[in-house]
């Protein structure tokens, strides 16, 4: 699998290179706007998982690279601000001097590359799996912390990770009672984001209490 994956990455890199070379040959490169991203990542065996269909970083975190026309001045080369794929459309519109016909969920990233900040503190991610089985996942990332709620039929399982200290997401802080308030805060943030997005699913009102009760044998005092 890894050989095929790396081969496809090499193919994509070569083909993007061909497009860029033509832009340069035609004298269009300095005027060109190029945005590179992906709809999802690939687990490739991490967490003993393959493909996508989960909220771990290997699947949910994707590149977002922008090459702007030379006339657009920037003040940064990279940013660690929380952005989302919903920012793609408003960014393209803004860079082309256009406005959306209706309100969008995302924000233009032009202010970011010019040294500004986005008007958001968190990013909401949702995945609806096999509807007939009732499997789904919801996620909120706020600051260094990520909350994942795994849903299967009537069960809702909580995962909380400190992405700065635990980039591989190996220590579920939901089992650590010293993080109770942080977990509750993230659950509230996620619930609010789901309602704002018009999500057809809802979190249990006593989700955290149910989780602690059901998985108390794995809880650290």
Image (tube, helix red, strand yellow):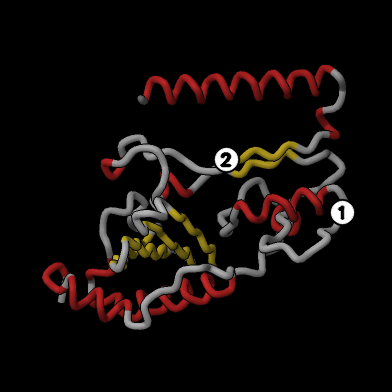
Task: Tell me which residue sits at (83%, 60%) in the image.
Answer: 101
Farthest-out residue, front: 132
Q: Is 75 on the left or on the right of 182, as rendered? A: right
Q: In this view of the protein, can residue 164 be seen by the observer?
A: no
Q: Nearer the viewer, residue 107 or 130?
A: 130
- Near mark 2 (Cα within 10 A), the count class, few <14, some 14-19 or many ≥20, is few
Q: Residue at horizontal 52%, vertical 70%?
A: 194
**Residue at horizontal 22 percent and vertical 76 percent from the top:** 212
Is 119 rendered above or below residue 5?
Answer: below
Q: Earlier in the sequence, mark 1 or mark 2?
A: 2
Indicate the quadrant containing the N terminus: top left, top right, bottom left or bottom right. Answer: top left
* Rendering coords of residue 202 (x, y %): 44, 73
Which label number is shown at residue 158?
Answer: none
Q: Quadrant of residue 47?
A: top left
The percent position of residue 53, horizontal first and vertical second, equals 41, 47
Is residue 155 visible in this depiction of the protein? yes
As drawn, the label of residue 38 is 2
**Real-space Cα separation, disc 1 to disc 2, in angstroms:** 23 Å
**Quadrant in which the C terminus is drawn:** bottom left
| Label 1 sits on residue | 98
Q: In this view, does 41 lie above or below 150?
A: above
State left or right for residue 27 relative to residue 91.
right
Residue 54 image position (x, y, % from top left): 39, 50
Left or right: where 119 falls relative to 201: right
């Amino acid at each position: 699998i890894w050989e095929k994956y790396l081969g496809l990455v090499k193919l994509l890199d070569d083909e993007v290179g061909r497009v860029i070379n033509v832009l340069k040959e035609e004298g269009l490169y300095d005027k060109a706007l190029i945005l590179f991203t992906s709809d999802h990542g690939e687990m490739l065996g991490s967490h003993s998982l393959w493909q996508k269909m989960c909220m771990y970083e290997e699947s949910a975190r994707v590149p977002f690279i922008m090459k702007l026309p030379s006339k657009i001045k920037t003040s940064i080369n990279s940013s660690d601000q929380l952005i989302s794929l919903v920012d793609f459309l408003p960014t393209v519109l803004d860079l082309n001097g256009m406005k959306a016909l209706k309100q969008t969920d995302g924000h233009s990233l032009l202010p970011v590359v010019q040294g500004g900040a986005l008007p958001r503190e968190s990013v909401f991610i949702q995945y609806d799996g096999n509807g007939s089985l009732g499997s789904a996942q919801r996620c909120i990332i706020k600051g260094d912390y990520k909350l994942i709620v795994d849903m299967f039929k009537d069960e809702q399982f909580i995962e909380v990770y400190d992405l700065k200290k635990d980039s591989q997401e190996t220590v579920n802080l939901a089992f650590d009672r010293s993080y109770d308030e942080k977990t509750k805060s993230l659950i509230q943030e996620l619930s609010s984001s789901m309602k704002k997005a018009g999500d057809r699913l809802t979190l249990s009102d006593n989700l955290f209490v149910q989780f602690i009760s059901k998985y108390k044998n794995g809880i650290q005092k």
